[in-house]
Image (cartoon, rainbow, N blue to C red):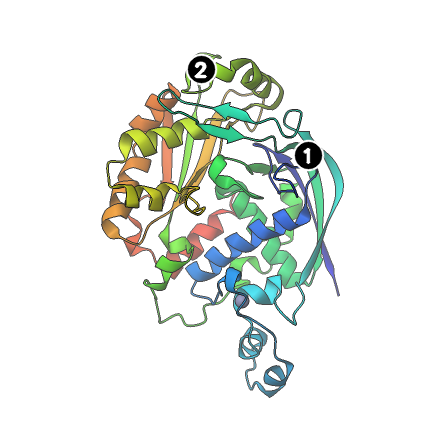
Amino acid sequence: MFNRLVINIRTLTPLWTGGLDGTMDRIHETGIIGSLRWWYEAIVRGLGGSACDASEHTCSFDMKKYRESKAADECQRLRDAGLCDVCQVFGATGWRRRFRVSIIEDRTRLAWEPRDKALNIRPPERARGWYLLPGYVGTLTMIFEGEEKIISLLASLFLWLEKFGTLGARPQLGYGAFRILNRGEVLRSVRKWQWNVLRSTNPDRDGKDKAMEHPDLRRFLFFRYEFVPSRPGWWTMVPGIGRVGSRVQLLVFQLGMVPTTPALKNEWRFNQWQGNQHDELEIFGTLRPERRRGRISATWAYRKDKKNGVWFIHGWAWMPKEEKLAEHLWKILTNAHIWNKVLGVEGKLTTFPSQRWEEHGYNTVRRFLQEGLDD
Ligand SMILES: [Zn+2]
């Protein structure tokens, strides 16, 4: 028996799902699924479940082992058959993904034209700056189909991502913030199961060391910054924006979004971070010699509602292994004065967890996930 979940979203910052030549030609379902999987992995690890390293494709389904498993619990049988908790849902060799997704209504367009024209945000003192390609903006309706439990899980995930995460690729550049337009309907799909579908493989083992190697919610800092600017043109003073002001102006008036991510990253990386280059690359990423993703993602500034004047930025950081670095990064990101200075506004910064994350175990992660379901 298949259940359906209809999710109707509006983009708050451009959605990026990739394409063949490095630009976007349309919204690709694979880019959406890829990001759901990435988050699901971090969540499963954060709750003590099993998650393989997706880049290594270690899971594969073995029918013989499945039949031989003595476990009463279906999840455990699937684990015995060679599937981690993530692959059980998202698929692996010999095991199909447990849900189907299709985009049934796509009222999106490129944030600007043409699709290979980058917006170059170059804060003072930077030689190159950041190049932002147009992602897609507008409203989008997706349909997910699968068993009730899986549908409940996806609904929980979307509700949580709306508040704390992003959808699609390039979150480091601020893409992928969205709003669910049919929230009540999505909530109804999670009533029965919520996050309880997910159980720890081994709740006794807190495996902090494992949390270091792969994204794990226990090592994430989430932040939300909100502000009501006192001047309508606040964004013209954000470092790097003035040079491309007329193009950004269109984004502000038509879409209620401002690409503030480069200015914040520039400040954090080049003005606040005082450390050796090795550590800097570890935190902020690099393109050379090989591409390494930065650990910090912050959305562009966006307005959820054109009628009120509140702007938001949200995002997260995956904390590095070394405590000294993590502590340093924590201090920088949780300092509201830095945010205020860069954006030239007076805002309110909230972080999750509000205290240091060392104390955070599976239960706090579970509570945090539950917040996604609250109004
Ligand atoms: Zn797996």
Density class for disc 1 (Cα within 10 Å; few <14, some 14-19, many ≥20) is some
- Confirm whether residue 289 shows in the render: yes
Look at mark 1 in the image and give the residue it sits on: 139
The numbered mark at residue 234 is: 2
Instruction: Using residue 195 as the reference point, say whether residue 262 is left or right of it.
Output: left
Residue toward you, 363 or 52: 52
Q: Position of residue 104 (x, y in %)?
A: 77, 44
Rendered residue at 37%/36% (across/down): 350
* Quarter holding ligand 1: bottom right
Q: Position of residue 189 (x, y in %)?
A: 64, 53
Q: In this rendering, is residue 94 above or below 327?
A: below
Q: In this rendering, is residue 7 above or below 124?
A: below
Q: Amino acid at mark 2?
A: Trp
Rendered residue at 31%/41% (across/down): 280
Label 2 near label 1: C-beta < 8 Å? no
Secondary element at tag 1: strand
Rendered residue at 47%/52% (across/down): 369
Residue 272 found in image quarter: top left
Secondary element at tag 2: helix
Density class for disc 2 (Cα within 10 Å; few <14, some 14-19, many ≥20) is few
Q: Amino acid at mark 1?
A: Thr
Q: In this rendering, is residue 51 above or below 187?
A: below
Residue toward you, 22 or 173: 22
Q: Position of residue 164 (x, y in %)?
A: 48, 43
Rendered residue at 44%/23% (across/down): 122
